Image (cartoon, grey):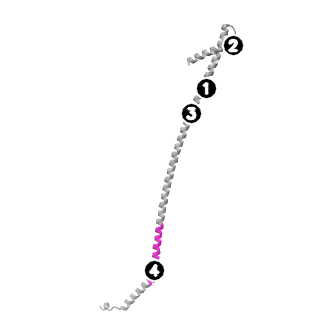
Amino acid sequence: MDTITNIEIGPILWTIFNFLLLLILLRVFAWKPILSALSNREKTISDALNRAETAQAEADRVLAENKKAMQRAEEDAQRVLRESREYAERMQAEATQKAQDEGRRILDQAKQEIERNKQQALNEMRAEVANLAVGASEKILNETLDPERHKRLVEDYLAQASQGAAVNN
């Protein structure tokens, strides 16, 4: 028991003094730089987080703009496609209408040409019939008609033939 009661205060005091001196030295020389380094590190991390948040917000904004631009481009493409389809349908309708009009015009021209040819044939036939009638009359009468009488007979015959043709039509 002697060793327990026999406590030497000198080494204890020197130990406490050394410990306090170490704390003071650490505080003066190490604590401030460590706290400053920690503070700088905290500030750097905070700035990096802020920049990351800003970059994330900017990326979200650009992504939203890109989506809107893609949507507008899709709408424009659909509009152009719809307009092209409508234009093609109009062109087809116009071409069909032109073809029908041209067909009607050609048909009308053909009818007019047929009517002209018919009239020409009828006129030629009337002239031939008149010549045959005059020739037959001359042979029957065995005489030559004077030109005035000849002309009157032909006109009378043509008038009768025209009336007969009009009645038949």
5 horizontally vs 134: left or right: left
Q: Is residue 129 above or below residue 103?
A: above
Placement of 8 over or under 65, stated as above or below: below
Outermost residue to the left: 1
Mark closer to the observer (3, 4): 3
Query: In which quadrant of the rendered view does residue 116 lie?
Result: top right
Magenta region, main secondary structure: helix
Report, in whole angstroms, how far the alpha carbon at label 1 lies from the one at label 3.
18 Å
Q: CA distance from mark 2 to mark 4?
A: 151 Å
Q: Amino acid at mark 4?
A: Lys
Inter-mark Cα distance, 1 to 4? 118 Å
Q: Residue at label 1?
A: 113
Label 3 environment density (alpha carbons within 10 Å; few <14, some 14–19, many ≥20): few
Instruction: Choose between 80 and 135: the one closer to the eye.
Output: 135
Q: Is residue 14 left or right of residue 86?
A: left
Callout 4 secondary element: helix
Sequence order check, earlier mark of 1 and 3: 3
Q: What residue is pinned by disc 3? A: 101
Q: Amino acid at mark 1?
A: Glu
Task: Mark 2 or mark 1: name the one nearer the start of the chain.
Answer: 1
